[in-house]
Image: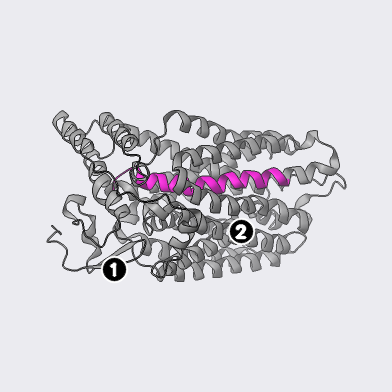
């Protein structure tokens, strides 16, 4: 029975998703067993994830095994952050092997280097998202992390090669590493959203997203320890920043669970039941009697309706279906504008501080990275209080204001510049946390990987354009070029906030 707490529930029948709007959305944070009844308008896929599997996950709560998976997924996200941000530090010390000129003063090569990882992420996100919906989240995540780690290790061998192929070699493996990052992002957040019940989903996704901050801090610390003192040892830096991806991929093979929602919806009922039983057996927050009741529920899980495995064409048509393509469009634009602004600045922040004549650009970059911590903690606190949509909108507006302050103080006050930069990164981190949860909940599990892959690809396109634009402005430019870069990033954040405002609040909140 539909809970009496809900005054109005409007079910809109979409081809691939069911949207539920509530007059009082704050009441939606009730338990699943008081939330909804199975309705004929739901797709069998939605009945699987909402009614069949999620009731079991809700009863289990948050078990130690789920928490271990959470940590692993967080490490995977941290490894992605390291790979994305590493090149921004490398270009500050890398010299053209044939001319000896600083690579960050050559617009062509600096653009290719900083955008290479995002070009790889564009293609990696598209294909891994779709194949994650076909083959599973876990194998795609492991393969992507492995590719990321191997590419990072091989890029550290650049200086061992002849001078004329060093730059192309480095660019090539930054692109390949980007393919791995692009592949792991949709798998990471799709798996996080499906390993726990709706009541825990926001918390878990927020924690996983917070590991991005750990990755940025790790990169900044290693850069300070190596590049600040011995810049010629940047291959050692490249090797050390590849380690998180290698370690994460190995641990995921050994410990990580596959999504029980994915297993159920793809007819792998035995594997789904085994996964749920492992989660149930590891739980220490329920009594033995409750554990036995949950085990009985798992044994009686109804098999999914027989339906053909989705083809790549069906998955693409799903996110472009008439009743869902509007949200697909706005989510893709949201990723584009947020990535253009955030990664465009983060990839060049060390050079921005260098252009503004900071005496220790690595120490300042560390404070810039440290600013993600209050941003992520704010997201963790506010996401369930104000909702996903409002968190994203207000965080991006905060980033817009911070970018204006960053630009205003860039020519007059180093303290003001540092504070403005830190505020920009803090609000951006908060926005990313909200977007990670918001976008995952806007799509059903059968399309989640595909949708997140395409949205991520649009984000990478924004990242490429942002880094190229900033390269053309900063490389060889004056201090005034920094002002142009920052104002452009602020406008991009403002446009992204508008896209988020046009999206519906997610059902789960």
Residue at figure coordinates x 60%, y 65% from the top left: 486
Q: Position of residue 437 (x, y in %)?
A: 39, 54
Q: Earlier in the sequence, mark 1 or mark 2?
A: 1
74 with respect to 57 (left or right): right
Q: Is residue 5 visible?
A: yes
Nearest to the observer: residue 382 or residue 365: 382
Q: Indicate which label's residue lies in the foreground, 1 or 2.
A: 1
Nearest to the observer: residue 451 or residue 26: 451
Q: Position of residue 170 (x, y in %)?
A: 73, 43
Which quadrant of the figure contains the C terminus? bottom left
428 with respect to 86 (left or right): left
The scheme the figure's colours follow is: one colour
Labelled disc at residue 344: 2
Can you name the residue that lies furthest to the right here? Answer: 99
Residue at figure coordinates x 53%, y 55% from the top left: 422
- Label 1 to label 2: alpha-carbon separation: 38 Å
Which quadrant of the figure contains the N terminus? bottom left
Nearest to the observer: residue 111 or residue 181: 181
Does the segment drawn in magenta span residue 190? yes
The residue that label 1 is drawn on is 12
Q: Which range of residues does the magenta coloring cover?
A: 171-197
Decide: is 390 above or below 45.
below
Using a 10 Å C-alpha cutoff, classify the residue at mark 1 as few (fewer than 14 neighbours), some (14 to 19) or many (20 or more): some
Q: Position of residue 186 (x, y in %)?
A: 48, 49
Provide the major secondary structure of the magenta segment: helix
Nearest to the observer: residue 264 or residue 107: 264
């Amino acid at each position: 029975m539909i809970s009496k707490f809900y005054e109005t529930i409007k079910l809109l029948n979409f081809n691939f998703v069911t949207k539920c709007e509530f007059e009082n959305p704050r009441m939606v944070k009730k338990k699943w067993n008081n939330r909804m009844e199975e309705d004929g308008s739901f797709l069998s896929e939605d009945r699987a994830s909402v009614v069949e599997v999620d009731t079991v996950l809700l009863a289990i709560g948050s078990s130690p095994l789920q928490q271990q998976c959470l940590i692993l997924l967080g490490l995977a996200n941290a490894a992605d952050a390291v790979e994305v941000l590493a090149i921004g530090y490398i270009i500050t010390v890398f010299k053209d092997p044939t001319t000896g000129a600083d690579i960050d003063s050559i617009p062509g090569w600096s653009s290719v280097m900083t955008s290479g990882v995002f070009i790889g992420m564009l293609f990696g996100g598209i294909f891994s998202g779709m194949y994650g919906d076909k083959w599973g989240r876990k194998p795609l995540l492991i393969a992507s992390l492995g590719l990321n780690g191997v590419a990072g290790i091989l890029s550290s061998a650049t200086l061992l090669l002849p001078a004329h192929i060093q730059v192309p070699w480095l660019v090539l493996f930054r692109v390949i590493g980007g393919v791995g990052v692009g592949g792991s992002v949709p798998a990471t957040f799709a798996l996080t959203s499906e390993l726990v019940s709706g009541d825990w989903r926001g918390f878990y996704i927020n924690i996983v997203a917070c590991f991005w901050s750990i990755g940025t801090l790790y990169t900044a610390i290693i850069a300070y320890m190596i590049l600040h003192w011995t810049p010629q040892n940047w291959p050692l830096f490249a090797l050390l920043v590849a380690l998180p991806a290698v370690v994460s991929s190995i641990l995921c093979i050994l410990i990580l669970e596959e999504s029980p929602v994915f297993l159920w919806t793809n007819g792998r009922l035995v594997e789904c039941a085994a996964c749920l039983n492992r989660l149930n057996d590891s739980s220490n927050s329920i009594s033995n009697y409750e554990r036995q009741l949950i085990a009985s529920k798992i044994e009686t899980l109804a098999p999914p309706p027989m339906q053909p495995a989705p083809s790549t064409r069906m998955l693409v048509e799903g996110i472009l279906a008439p009743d869902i393509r509007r949200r697909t469009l706005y989510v893709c634009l949201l990723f584009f504008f947020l990535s253009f602004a955030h990664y465009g600045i983060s990839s060049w922040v060390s050079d921005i501080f260098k252009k503004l004549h900071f005496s220790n650009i690595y120490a300042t970059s560390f404070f810039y990275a440290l600013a993600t911590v209050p941003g992520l903690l704010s997201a963790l606190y506010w996401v369930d209080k104000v909702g996903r949509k409002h968190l994203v909108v207000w965080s991006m507006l905060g980033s817009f204001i911070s970018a204006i302050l960053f630009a205003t103080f860039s020519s007059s006050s180093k303290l003001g510049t540092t504070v403005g930069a830190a505020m920009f990164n803090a609000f951006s981190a908060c926005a990313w946390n909200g977007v990670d949860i918001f976008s995952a909940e806007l799509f059903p599990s059968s399309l989640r990987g595909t949708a997140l892959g395409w949205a991520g690809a649009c984000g990478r396109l924004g990242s490429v354009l942002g880094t190229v634009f900033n390269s053309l402005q900063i490389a060889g430019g004056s201090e005034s070029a920094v002002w142009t870069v920052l104002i452009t990033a602020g406008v991009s954040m403002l446009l992204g906030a508008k896209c988020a405002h046009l999206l519906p609040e997610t059902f789960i909140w």
